[in-house]
Image (cartoon, helix red, strand yellow):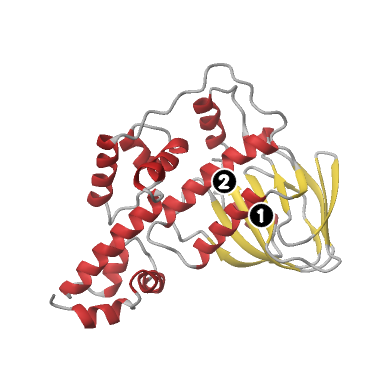
């Protein structure tokens, strides 16, 4: 890729305060930032990643005015308002009229769009084919954004899988609803293979064998011999929960066993449970068990 996904926000919004970032969470194929923006003009910018922007909070009488590739847009800022900025668009005039307290920025690379077209039997579609839009109201994209923001605020044991599943859903939605024209089929869409008992068992065995490793959606899909776009949906249909939640449950159950043994320090248990930050591990474990790791160890050590 021409630049790291999170370099986009650093270059485009030099005056905006960074509140939250996915930079330490190990996500692949999508990045997210929550920023507060002062009023004023932004420098000219040419996007090398696709950006979806979601207003978490509004601004009374505030608006964003921007011009990209000669198209001028002026949008009132209300909670849930979306902006879409495709790859390659040159924005030479961006103005924020009032300070914006919480704006979520999502960044996508171009490769998933190519893969999606291939799987659906459509003509190739690139991320640059997504329209340059402002003032969009799309409830599905809003919910995806809020789910990613929640994961940034309180990381879970299956956070990378969750983020990558949401990235796949976001890519599909952008192609379906916000492309210059829907991709026309050039061949019959590939029918995804069934996630039968044998494939499901292989995936679950892989999860058990790699609980302490950085598992991505593509890793599990490869074990099942299917595309990431289909795997997450079929796994949930088969097992009853999405893969990120299943993996999180396995990791936290394994953490319980390690805490009972009383041999490893909490920081090491956090790492093998998929957390780089012990505080995030403690919060996730408490939501799962009702106790902090220290409390659980004190009650169950030696059992």
Q: Is residue 2 visible?
A: no
Residue visible at 77% across and 61% down in the picture: 78
Q: In this rendering, would 162 be left or right of 77?
A: left
Give the x, y percent position of residue 127.
Answer: 63, 36
Q: Is residue 121 visible?
A: yes
The residue beneath circle 1 is 11
- The one nearer the camera, 282 or 107, is 282
Q: Residue furthest left?
A: 302
The residue beneath circle 2 is 3
113 above or below 250?
A: above
Give the x, y percent position of residue 15.
Answer: 71, 65
Q: In this rendering, would 58 be left or right of 282?
A: right
Distance from the alpha carbon under mark 2 to that under mark 1: 11 Å
Give the x, y percent position of residue 16.
Answer: 69, 65
93 above or below 115?
A: below
Residue visible at 78% across and 69% down in the picture: 99
């Amino acid at each position: 890729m021409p630049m790291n996904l999170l370099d986009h926000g650093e270059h485009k919004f030099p005056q905006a305060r960074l509140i939250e970032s996915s930079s330490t969470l190990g996500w692949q194929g999508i990045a997210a930032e929550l920023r507060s923006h002062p009023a004023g003009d932004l420098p000219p910018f040419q996007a090398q990643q696709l950006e979806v922007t979601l207003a978490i909070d509004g601004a009374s009488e505030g608006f964003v005015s921007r011009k990209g590739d000669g198209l001028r847009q002026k949008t009132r800022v209300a909670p849930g308002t979306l902006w879409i900025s495709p790859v390659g668009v040159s924005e030479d005039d961006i103005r924020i009229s009032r300070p914006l307290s919480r704006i979520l920025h999502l960044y996508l690379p171009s490769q998933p769009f190519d893969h999606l077209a291939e799987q659906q039997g459509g003509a190739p579609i690139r991320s640059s084919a997504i329209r340059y839009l402002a003032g969009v109201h799309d409830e599905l994209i809003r919910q995806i954004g809020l789910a990613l923001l929640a994961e940034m605020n309180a990381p879970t044991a299956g956070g990378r899988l969750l983020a990558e599943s949401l990235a796949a859903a976001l890519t599909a939605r952008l192609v379906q609803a916000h492309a210059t024209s829907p991709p026309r089929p050039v061949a019959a869409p590939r029918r995804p293979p069934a996630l039968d008992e044998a494939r499901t068992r292989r995936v679950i065995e892989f999860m058990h064998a790699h609980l302490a490793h950085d598992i991505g959606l593509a890793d599990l899909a490869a074990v099942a011999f299917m595309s990431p776009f289909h795997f997450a949906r079929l796994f949930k249909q088969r097992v009853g929960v999405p893969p990120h939640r299943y993996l999180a449950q396995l990791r936290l159950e394994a953490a319980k066993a390690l805490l009972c043994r009383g041999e490893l320090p909490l920081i090491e248990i956090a790492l093998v449970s998929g957390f780089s930050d012990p505080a995030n591990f403690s919060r996730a474990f408490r939501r799962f068990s009702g106790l902090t790791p220290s409390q659980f160890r004190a009650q169950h050590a030696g059992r």
